[in-house]
Image (cartoon, rainbow, N blue to C red):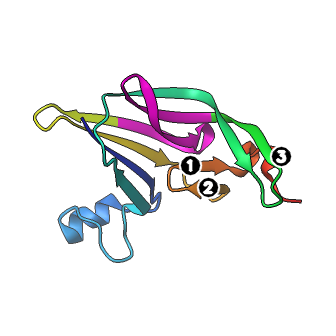
Amino acid sequence: MKLFVTFKQQNPDFNKKYANEYHSGKESDGNWKDNWSIGFELPDKVEKIAIIEKGDLKVLGKNEDGVEINASIPNMTILECFVNNEVVDKFAVSKDLIKKTHKAYNGKYDTTRFYFYFKPREDYFKISDWLYVLEEDIPQILKKN
């Protein structure tokens, strides 16, 4: 199946009544539905996906000084994408940053869309395009002094 993953933070100040009255229910300048949104289409077909509601994300690598890092980021919602029963991609967001998630499948086009809706918080870091972590969830070993 084709997989599209979207991260978005809805605008809590969006005024639906104003949109209905003056813009046929659509957003307008100064009255946006989302503060921001970014989406990805995976280039390869995915056979299945799995959601881990409250998992630990393993982080392996080296820091700027070349020191090996082997850490775990707790309290994550992780979307795993499988091909041949192997994880080929992961998307992860701190559990407490998520307002809700939504999965929609279209059988006609064999397409799944998965959405991460963020709470209106600003105390998180975008580590990569597919990883969003609350400051409080970042392990000390990953923080700079």
SS state under label 1: strand
Query: Secondary structure beneath disc 2?
Result: strand
Query: Would residue 44 appear left or right of 119 to someone viewing this image?
Result: left
Can you name the residue that lies furthest to the top here?
Answer: 85
Give the class, few, some or many, for how many residues have Cα within 10 Å of label 2's Cα (few <14, many ≥20).
Answer: few
Is mark 3 in CB contact (under 8 Å) with mark 1? no
Front residue of 29 and 130: 130
Three-letter code for the amino acid on which mark 1 is drawn: Leu
Q: Residue at x 80, y 45 (%)?
A: 68
Return the disc, 3 or 2, that comes first in the chain's sequence.
Answer: 2
Q: In this figure, which residue is indicated by the disc labeled 3?
A: 141
Q: Can you tell which quarter of the image residue 70 is in?
A: top right
Residue 59: image x %, image y %? 68, 41
Under tag 3, what secondary structure? helix
Residue under numbered circle 2: 127
Q: Position of residue 41 (x, y in %)?
A: 32, 50
Q: Is residue 4 left or right of residue 143?
A: left
Q: Are marks 2 and 1 in contact (CB under 8 Å)?
A: yes
Residue underneath mark 1: 131
Q: Quadrant of residue 85?
A: top left
The residues bearing labels 3 and 1 have C-alpha atoms spaced at a distance of 17 Å
Please identify the residue farthest to the bottom as the structure is shown.
Answer: 29
Q: Tell me the CA gap for discs 3 and 2.
A: 15 Å
116 to the left or right of 108? right
Q: Nearer the viewer, residue 60 or 31?
A: 60
